[in-house]
Image (cartoon, rainbow, N blue to C red):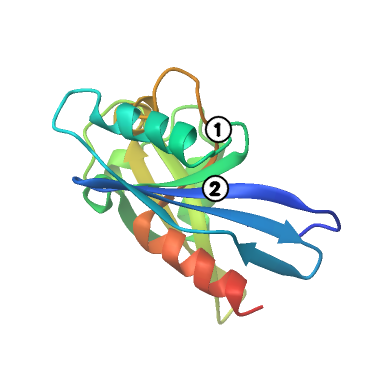
């Protein structure tokens, strides 16, 4: 969540096996307002999530053009603490070998820095999250063909931490 000097709206979306949950937020200077919380059941069909999202937009007047933040399933995201020398080596490489750090077999691995910790002697460690691009694409495609403005993807635990940290600033 970004604090800005002007008002804007975002939607937080959580997809479970049985429901799609959403919370539209209005960000105003100095505060964020939770407008409402909505849960829509997901059918057993192949398009259950898309149908639930369509119903949410139609029945609860959600504007899919607002920026949305979603969460990846926990079992699809892996974490590793990596020291600053290894992180620098990996980020400078044309083809970084993330398989040494994460139990992922895919050839295309997507990574993101979550946090860092300063150690004595000017060293640092970084907490890096990783998932396979195929899993990320599958999650993004579950929202249907280009209907939602997805701006952020978090692992579930970091989505919770980001919300808590934001609310306690």
Q: Is residue 1 above or below residue 168?
A: above
Q: Is residue 41 above or below residue 132?
A: below
What residue is at 50 percent from the left and 23 percent from the top? 147
Pick whichever, 78 or 38, lies toward us. Answer: 38
Residue 47 in the image: state x and y as whole percent. Answer: 25, 23
Within 10 Å of disc 1 (Cα), the crowding (few <14, some 14-19, many 20+) is some
Residue 45 in the image: state x and y as whole percent. Answer: 16, 25
In what quadrant of the picture does the C terminus appear?
A: bottom right
Left or right for 80, reference 34: left
In what quadrant of the picture does the N terminus appear?
A: bottom right
Residue farthest along the right direction in this orientation: 5
Q: Which residue is mark 1?
A: 64
Left or right for 2, reference 110: right
Query: Can see residue 3?
Result: yes
Could you say which quadrant of the image residue 37 lies in? bottom left
Left or right for 33, reference 4: left
What residue is at 25 percent from the left and 48 percent from the top? 16
Q: Secondary structure at mark 1?
A: loop
Q: Which residue is mark 2?
A: 11
What residue is at 67 percent from the left and 48 percent from the top? 9
Pick whichever, 79 or 120, lies toward us. Answer: 79
Q: Secondary structure at mark 2?
A: strand
Residue 15 in the image: state x and y as whole percent. Answer: 31, 45
Query: Can see residue 2?
Result: no
State which tag comes first along the sequence, 2 or 1. 2
Q: Which mark is residue 56?
A: none
What residue is at 27 percent from the left and 53 percent from the top? 74
Q: What's the CA distance linking mark 2 and mark 1?
A: 9 Å
Residue 125 in the image: state x and y as whole percent. Answer: 48, 66
């Amino acid at each position: 969540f970004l604090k800005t000097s002007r008002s804007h709206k975002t939607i937080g979306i959580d997809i479970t096996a049985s429901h799609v949950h959403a919370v539209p937020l209005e960000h105003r200077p100095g505060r964020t307002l939770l407008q409402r919380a909505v849960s829509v059941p997901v059918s057993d069909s192949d398009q259950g999530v898309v149908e639930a999202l369509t119903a949410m937009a139609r029945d609860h007047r959600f504007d899919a053009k607002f920026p949305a933040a979603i969460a990846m399933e926990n079992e699809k995201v892996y974490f590793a603490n990596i020291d600053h020398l290894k992180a620098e080596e990996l980020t400078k490489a044309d083809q970084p070998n993330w398989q040494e750090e994460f139990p992922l077999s895919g050839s295309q691995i997507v990574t993101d820095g979550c946090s860092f910790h300063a150690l004595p002697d000017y060293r640092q460690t970084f907490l890096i999250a990783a998932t396979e691009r195929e899993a990320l694409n599958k999650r993004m495609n579950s929202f249907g063909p280009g209907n939602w403005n997805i701006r952020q993807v978090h692992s579930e635990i970091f989505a919770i931490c980001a919300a808590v940290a934001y609310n306690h600033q």
